[in-house]
Image: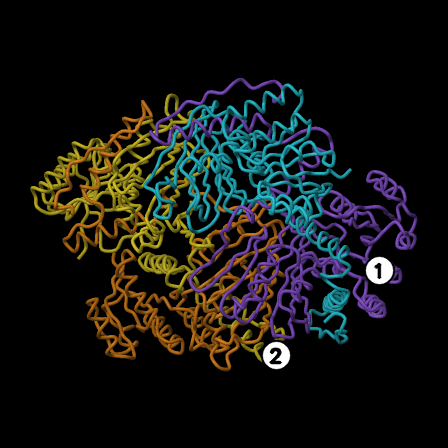
Chain colours: A cyan, B purple, C yellow, D orange
Amino acid sequence: MTVRVGVIGLGLIGADHVARLRSRVAGADVVAVCDIDSSRAKAIGESVGALVLSTATELVRSDAIDAVVVTSATTAHAEAVLACITAKRPVFVEKPLAQTAQECLDIVSAEMAHGERLVQVGFMRRFDPGYAAIKASLDAGELGVPLLMHNIHRNRTAPTATSAGLIRESVIHEIDAIRWLLAQEIQSAQVALPRPSPHAPQGVRDPQLALFRTTGGVLVDVECFANSQYGYDVRCEVVGSTGTAAIDGHGDAIWTRVGSASRSVHRDWRSRFGPAYDRELQAWVDSVAAGEATGPSSWDGYAATRVAESTVSSLATERIVAIEMIERPALYA
Amino acid sequence: MTVRVGVIGLGLIGADHVARLRSRVAGADVVAVCDIDSSRAKAIGESVGALVLSTATELVRSDAIDAVVVTSATTAHAEAVLACITAKRPVFVEKPLAQTAQECLDIVSAEMAHGERLVQVGFMRRFDPGYAAIKASLDAGELGVPLLMHNIHRNRTAPTATSAGLIRESVIHEIDAIRWLLAQEIQSAQVALPRPSPHAPQGVRDPQLALFRTTGGVLVDVECFANSQYGYDVRCEVVGSTGTAAIDGHGDAIWTRVGSASRSVHRDWRSRFGPAYDRELQAWVDSVAAGEATGPSSWDGYAATRVAESTVSSLATERIVAIEMIERPALYA
Amino acid sequence: MTVRVGVIGLGLIGADHVARLRSRVAGADVVAVCDIDSSRAKAIGESVGALVLSTATELVRSDAIDAVVVTSATTAHAEAVLACITAKRPVFVEKPLAQTAQECLDIVSAEMAHGERLVQVGFMRRFDPGYAAIKASLDAGELGVPLLMHNIHRNRTAPTATSAGLIRESVIHEIDAIRWLLAQEIQSAQVALPRPSPHAPQGVRDPQLALFRTTGGVLVDVECFANSQYGYDVRCEVVGSTGTAAIDGHGDAIWTRVGSASRSVHRDWRSRFGPAYDRELQAWVDSVAAGEATGPSSWDGYAATRVAESTVSSLATERIVAIEMIERPALYA
Amino acid sequence: MTVRVGVIGLGLIGADHVARLRSRVAGADVVAVCDIDSSRAKAIGESVGALVLSTATELVRSDAIDAVVVTSATTAHAEAVLACITAKRPVFVEKPLAQTAQECLDIVSAEMAHGERLVQVGFMRRFDPGYAAIKASLDAGELGVPLLMHNIHRNRTAPTATSAGLIRESVIHEIDAIRWLLAQEIQSAQVALPRPSPHAPQGVRDPQLALFRTTGGVLVDVECFANSQYGYDVRCEVVGSTGTAAIDGHGDAIWTRVGSASRSVHRDWRSRFGPAYDRELQAWVDSVAAGEATGPSSWDGYAATRVAESTVSSLATERIVAIEMIERPALYA
């Protein structure tokens, strides 16, 4: 079964998700789109062969779709998600779920009236291998009791950021990560503010340090720095009573335990090169669809096998063996 | 267009590719399979709803397919690939292309007779971001002239490895990587052998050190150690006349230039969390297809927004703010 | 000139400093010691050939000494340091300078009455190359304006720690590091407390998170965790408006700047191996004093030169050259 | 006892060792020097208050000295060392011991005639903590049986290097490290040569790859690249049958064992900050000798204690506490 998806809102992340659903997600097709900017909707819709609809309501009710992705502005989330619930459509909505907690409660109420879950919220850190590795360590009790959690969340630049927006749009990722990793609710919050960066927009408190305390007594700090100038750098360290688990800016996990700080070593090629195999077959499928072969050719297969054959002949003597090859045909130039 | 793929050979890597084509590659479907072990073919074919055919020849000729993946034993590669070329089918064949250089030449000849490329060989390192980063550095001339290249290729265990097999099946990955990264052919080869590991199979020379010299005067060493016991560890360092580019065992790239050794910092969330977004939407599409919502719920969306709202209220005072939430409904337990 | 040092207090750090002054510091000699435990004083004093005196006062006034090291209990610091100032003796006192700020002010007053500085306090992070590298980066303006500073200070176990002692004896290192690195005073302090570790002594709040704000608007957090179980781990990161400088648990410095995270590469052997050269000559001087040669021998010199000679002869042919050596004489067994 | 040292040869490394013996090595004094350049000998000798002698022979025979450091040109080593043995003087000689293996044998013979060891050769890697950590791992059998060893030895620039000199003066460090770490002799050598770097001096083969095989069947490669342009980078990895031990360019040790790559975590402050304590007390002793106090002052001691006191008062409430300090007196400006 192919899931026929309608996408509401085609800004940066919306366009990104359209491309993702078409070329990197299996079993889905983008069949309808809409955007408050109708020319943008038309351009993207036509480029992917999807229906271009005028409104979110029209899209949600269309028989052409099975499910909806909501990537419109945050202010428009609640209405779109509620329409999906009314229409009994599974819906994926980017974070935050809605503009206010009250709007979120309206969605919760509607979903409860419906009787089963229809909504998935875009807290995508739960799908990152680095965060998942920390989660696994915590769940296995490898760190003892969790006590502290340090988070860094830096962007290169954010010219339109506001003081509250840093929390509502950026720190909210860490808020979900805290709740998910620790399986505890957050009981209190505090913001501590250094002087603003000279690169922050006028009047905006950037960076900020948010402190959270959880029901289980864990103290969490989150540095949010939207105009760090140097890059995108997201890190996390959970400190337990017997060790720590952390991910660095590339998402690589590091554990400290008695006497050592360690990273995992891959068990086999599937974990190390799995994504490369995915990309390789995707490139092949794309080339087949395009009717033109790309990637390593028969010539490359010949050349490598020729070298390997000669190398094998050095096994007995450990001497240097010259390698002879035929000339490369023009087809493989 | 969906590419209808037939898969020949359903061992470890074959089964892996079937799963990959179905669930992680967009635009492809596995519609036919065959294997010398007919019960294995039946089990996998039925589980994915694909035709189960008796022979590679039958599969290649079937009208049901558009393209072929060859993941049978190396000894069977040449025959299957030649059949694909005869049938004018695009074919992806796992490395090595064939058992001998002569068989590879037969394939090259057949493809030349056909007049255009139909074959892609499974040298998947070209699709790894780490190797691609080294390639980009070299192509941009950032390292000066390449002079040396060091490679490590370690597996945990390989009970069926042979001395020649280490070269033909493992080092061949590095042989292709050398040719591709440097865009030079290999002129000579030499194997140097330490004492065998006590964990190597009886009579097998493991580890080995292979030395290659290229047409451009680059000297390359490759350590191949199939029974390292500790893990899968593949590394590469290219040494140029003004700096080096390397990838560590996780595929993270490190550059040395005057005075510093550096890793890149992500530019934005798309490079850091792109794969997590892919997995997130894949999980959502899968859950829609399965008719059961999973992942972060409306409740998670409410809880996070509630915390964010309270946090925002601390911005003005920098004081601790308590967070009140409704009780969690049973639907979200 | 050799500085004749008297040491007051011979506990863990005192004994350590005695050994340091005798064997790793040039130009000093330990000539007198005292301790409230007279048998400990006697044991250590006799082992190093130093006068064993009964009281700190007697030691401070002795003509045998030029300068004093105070490593007694914190409660005894003020009296000893004041006695040194009265006697016009240069004095090195372990941190903290005294038990209370008022006692510190008494010392400041006495030193001002004396008219010039006589006291050095043991804030030794200023002498660590990692901290010094951060300082140099800040002073050179490489990070832009400093905005935030994150610190980690973990010990393996501290069975006698108290909640206040964590601040007075451990965090005080970071307090000085903050003042020194930023060249700013601290304006306010706040402690935030997670649940105590089950490995903390009964009733002790361990770990703690201290927050400091400086006169220049920098916000600083310090995690202090005295019973982390896993090891001694001290880290520091200063976040500036255009980049960061950090040291990891080994004191290695890492910089982030636009697009990259970098470590320095050594410029020459003096920075990389300088300490090894120090240890090498120290070992040699010690062996001369002991009348018995150790370390690499003439035989090692011969063997290495013999191998090098043979290696040189392979330069022309790139062929394997066998190495012949005489049998190893018994003198070098 | 202070060891009175005479130094023969005052070039780069000689002058370095003079400074080392005077200011970083305990128990030694430089009392006599000589150099073929008499004005250089005069300048350095007078600056350190040492006798300036005309010849190595005169220095070796002088009653003013207890022991000799030979840091003259390699061609002059043998004569100076033999003179020391004749005079029964302990001697430290920089690597290589002598110009030829035959000269080394002459020294061995003279020392055997003397009947006990008098010579220590400057193979200083044995005194580096990183190499020592690998040695400890090997000796403890933590890596299983050693099979392979990879070495990198890069300098930034070496304008006077020769092809043979790279081996005789640079690779000789690795030759000793191989023999010492593995406790095995080297049986054969081979040099493999890529194209020379465009930054190598005219006609010089730089870089080189040397291959060694040991009596225990270990295969060792050494990359030597004297004109790498980017920095000084020395690395080493020993591959055993069950794991590896390596040091990176900063000398930090990394172990791979089943499933993990780990660095050590410090056990306590003595291993992490020991060298900082050494430097701290050295700076204090130097300041006492110079008659002028430096380093953290009483004011710093007061300020830190004042902050700590206020911080402690936040323990009960977790509220922000303002910090009041007296004005900084001019003495501490």
Q: Position of residue C60 (x, y in %)?
A: 13, 41
- Name above or below for residue D275 compared with residue C95: below
Asked if residue D98 can be seen in this view, the reply is: yes
Residue at the spot of label 2? C317
Asked if residue B204 can be seen in this view, the reply is: no
Residue A77 occupies quadrant: top right
- Name above or below for residue B247 compared with residue A102: below
The structure residue drawn at horizontal position 86% and vertical position 39%, both measured from the top left corner, is B46
- In the visual, does B145 lie left or right of A309? left
Q: Residue type at mark 1: give it.
A: Val
- Chain letter of the residue carrying label 2: C
- In the visual, does C302 lie left or right of C287? right
- Name above or below for residue B68 compared with residue D198: above
The structure residue drawn at horizontal position 43% and vertical position 33%, both measured from the top left corner, is C228
Q: Position of residue B37 (x, y in %)?
A: 88, 46
Q: Position of residue C311 (x, y in %)?
A: 55, 73
Residue nearer the viewer, C252 or D35: C252
Residue nearer the viewer, C130 or B313: B313
Q: Residue type at mark 2: give it.
A: Thr
Q: Which mark is residue B81?
A: 1
- Name above or below for residue D148 compared with residue D52: above
The structure residue drawn at horizontal position 53% and vertical position 35%, both measured from the top left corner, is A74
